[in-house]
Amino acid sequence: MSSPAKKRKRDDPGSASQRTRTIASFFQGQAGKQAEKTQQLTQPGSEVHTEQTLSDEALARKLQAEWDKEDVLPTSQADTPSDEPSLPLVSPGDNDREPTTVQKKGVLSLQSSTGTEDTVSLAVPFDQSPITFNATKYAHELQGHWASEGGDASYALLTRAFLLANATTSRIKIVDTLVNLLRVLIEADPSSVLPAVWLATSSISPPYDESELGLGGSSISKALKKVYGLNSQGLKSLYDKHGDAGDVAFEAKKRQSFTLMKPRPLRIKGVYQSLKKIAMSKGGGSQETKQRIVEKLLQDARGAEESRYIVRTLVQNLRIGAVKTTMLIALARAFLYSRSEGAGFSIYSQEEMARLKKDELAEIYTRAEEIVKASYARHPNYDDLVPCLLEIGVSDELLVRCGLQLHIPLRPMLGSITRDLSDMLTKLQGRDFSCEYKYDGQRAQVHCDVQGKVSIFSRHLENMTEKYPDLVSLVPQIRGEGVSSFILEGEVVAVDQESGELQAFQILTNRAKKNVDIGAIKVSVCLFAFDLMYLNGQPLLDRSFRERRELLRSLFVEIPRRFTWVKSLDATSADSEAVLEFFKGATDTKCEGIMVKVLDNMPKPDIEDNGTPTIDTDGVPDPPSKTDEKPESRNSKGSRRKALLSTYEPDKRLDSWLKVKKDYSASSETLDLIPVAGWHGQGRKAKWWSPILLAVRNPETGSLEAVTKCMSGFTDKFYQANKDKYAEGTPNIISRPSYVEYYGEPDVWFEPQEVWEMAFADITLSPTYTAAIGLVSDERGLSLRFPRFLKVREDKSIDEATTSDYLALLWRKQSERTKQEAEQPADIVEE
Ligand code: ATP
């Protein structure tokens, strides 16, 4: 199934070190080992391993052996595409072997494509512990190595790190690899740190910047054909075999003996700039321009691994586990060990680090990681974070230099799920909280600067300013006197202006995303504001929710049915009846339930008596009082319940915001899953796909992990539409994708492209499904009992589908609940 290294790794645990050594030797072409390797591959039983279960290196070796065999066959039996006379598929030969002696028809022997790998980069042991890895030594060596080619860090170095990260499932090893890569770059070529971070995170710009590569699969296919001399049939059979564009490029490059030109070594900066150019080329002729850049990149790739990662980068699926959190952790740690020449901040020596006890080291790491993560949550842009880190390292100043900023969206605070109202009341016992209607609309973060410029961002930080010109036009009216600049948050809901009634979320989704003409708007919206994070040049994140809300409601001006506050009720756990009434009111008004938010940082703080913070004449509130400081007990062990914060915590899902949804029962939480495959239906359903296989998203690996088969909740009409959409022979039916993790054999695979909201009875451990494997059990994944289709989430892209860690979280909550229920005394009624 997946070339997913992930699966291979699971099948072959503990061999990382060996693999590391042999990868290097393979690419360094140690001919002496070739015979031994080939022998291993052809041992009885080795054939039962398909390519999918082999490591990248083993796959390369296997191919090598196959081609070696093909080389000694008569030309007619060799795998030479008949209609491609230019660049044939012939044996590559190892670096130190003579070019193949069997010359095939039409071979252009211009330049050997082998022997060009950057063996210096390919030998750096990035996966060592940062405590032992000698970054300075490698930085010096590499600087010398790069000097003759302009001094910039080579893409080969990045490829080396990708290979090592790809060859392990150990999160520690992935982080270590990235930390060491970053350290070498910081010390040897600091200007390549930023492009390396973008490339390693499979992105080129922050989420609120709309730059996209805009490359279709066909551009990449065309380039692969042209550069590696494949015909359509050859390319298709490689795709069918691997299902991963990167693996196809790897194999095609390996097969290419000779290239027309000597490859110019790729540089990290150069590759990133090429991607930027691809993204920037717009308008007539842009497809050709993009195409040329892709071809050039493939042409210049030295060796098959570079080709693999260039193509994985182009399809934006690197699968090296360097997602946001991993990268932030790696950055934090790298800058504890290394700094560039001229940087003045202090770092730890490796000896110092080595002397520390395990928990002391963990504490230093955690502190640094918290700062970097907090900075990124407030200002999610590596373009600003990385230069700051290079200049000042990891310090509290980072949050000042690279913190909240107007027109840069912060990552929103999120709510934790609760089982029901009584669960919520138990969790918040002893605290004052506010219950708010949970409107069914679209979250919006509104920024306005002193000049009155407005930006609006979505929950996922996309820029929605052009979608809501009506909201933009409201800003001058809602901004009360004394408000110069602000960032506020609320839910945009479609509202009938005549009756004031809330309308279904679906209505909002009909609005175009761009260039909405204010005069042509048919569906009016209302912004129900619920938080204020920034006011008159000052962040308010550290203020209690009570203060922020008071500032919001006192300084901004309501406009009926256009801009108002979320309906709310302040309460404590003693007010269960009032809370229940409020909850009913919410669900009767087309709301999804309620959001419950802790009002103050400490239980019963002093400010409770009036709850209103004083406001300076310039409209800036006083700094927080002692009582608002973050309670120490937050991390204190031994206390039964954590002291909940009422501060605004960007990008965190804490229990200080709780979601209570309607019909809450064990199964009322729904999941947003991606349909990935189907089987031919039985009986009445024979003409449709049924059941359908659904997957969660693993943001760390980029894989989709199968979680359940579903055949319930679909109408016949839906089944038919689904069959029409995923009709055989259309591009929506694909060959087995490498990035879907599933051990079974569906009849067809769908091109993953939509998100379905699914209900279920409960979550179970499963030997068959791979979802969240490793998160709750090393052997078993998670699956759903009684899955039921609810609706297509038109508003969600597959990037927003439920993640495997969220599924694991739900599973843990469910286990907790089951345990609590088991502990409760049986409900015996005594007459
Ligand atoms: P999440 O946003 O928590 O990851 P999700 O996308 O599945 O989860 P829900 O579980 O439905 O969304 O609930 C959270 C969302 O509810 C918020 O992101 C916000 O858009 C919306 N919302 C509606 N009313 C409120 C409110 N009063 N306070 C906070 N959020 C609200």
Image: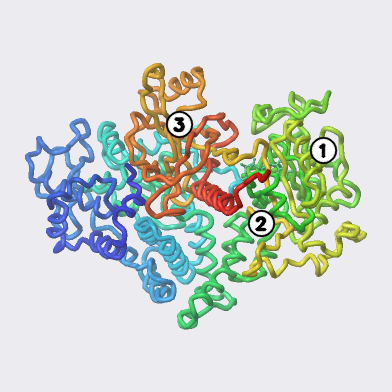
Q: Is residue 406 shown above or below 291?
A: below
Tell me if residue 38 comes above or below residue 672 in the rendering.
below
Question: Where residue 392 sits: x, y (%)?
Answer: 61, 71
Few, some or many residues within 10 Å of mark 3 (<14, 14–19, 20+): many
Q: Nearer the viewer, residue 781 or 88?
A: 781
Ligand 1 near label 3 (Cβ, under 8 Å)?
A: no
**Label 2 CB-ligand 1 distance < 8 A:** no
Q: Which comes sooner in the sequence, label 3 or label 2?
A: 2
Q: Is residue 705 visible?
A: yes
- In this view of the protein, can residue 152 be seen by the observer? no
State the residue position of label 1: 563
User: Whole-percent x and y of residue 482?
Assistant: 90, 52
Is disc 2 surrounded by few (<14), some (14 to 19) or many (20+) residues within 10 Å?
many
Gap between marks 3 and 2 measured at Cα: 39 Å
Q: Amino acid at mark 2?
A: Arg
Cα–Cα span, label 3 and label 1: 41 Å
The quarter in which the N terminus is drawn is top left
Q: Percent position (x, y) of residue 759?
A: 55, 35
**Residue 575, percent from left and from top:** 80, 48
- Secondary structure of the residue carrying numbered label 2: helix
Front residue of 694 and 698: 694
Residue under numbered circle 2: 378
Q: Secondary structure at mark 1?
A: strand
